[in-house]
Image: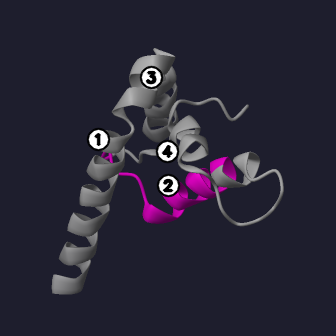
Amino acid sequence: MHMIKAARMFAAGTILALAAISTPAFAADGDGMQSFAKEVTAMANKDGMVSKRDFMAMMEKKFDAMDKGRKGMLSVPDVMRIFSDKTGQ
């Protein structure tokens, strides 16, 4: 039980941290955050919760779309573009 609670807290903290470091990308894009919010909202179940599986699948798809050379790595600006919805998704 404690592991589940800790994992949820870690996931929430990670999302908040990513949002905090991505703020300049959101500001530069304008509606990138709206697009991201729509995707996340669409994944939510009737209780307003998003499963880790669904969230990670969405992020993996975005990562793979940016990783054109299939190196398994992205630059910081590329990661920021994932959150500004400039991946063509």
- Kindly identify which residue carries mark 4: 43
Residue at 49% x, 33% y: name it.
36
**In the displayed structure image, the side of residue 18 where residue 3 appears, left or right:** left
- Closer-to-camera residue (52/63): 63
- The residue tagged with tag 3: helix, strand or loop? helix
Q: Nearer the viewer, mark 1 or mark 4?
A: 1
Q: Which mark is residue 55?
A: 2
N-terminal-most mark, 4 or 2: 4
- Residue 57 is a magenta residue: yes
Q: Nearer the viewer, mark 1 or mark 2?
A: 1
- Kindly identify which residue carries mark 1: 20
- Kindly identify which residue carries mark 3: 34
Q: Is residue 87 above or below residue 62?
A: above
N-terminal-most mark, 3 or 2: 3
Q: Which residues are magenta?
A: 47-62
**In the displayed structure image, the side of residue 4 where residue 33 appears, left or right:** right
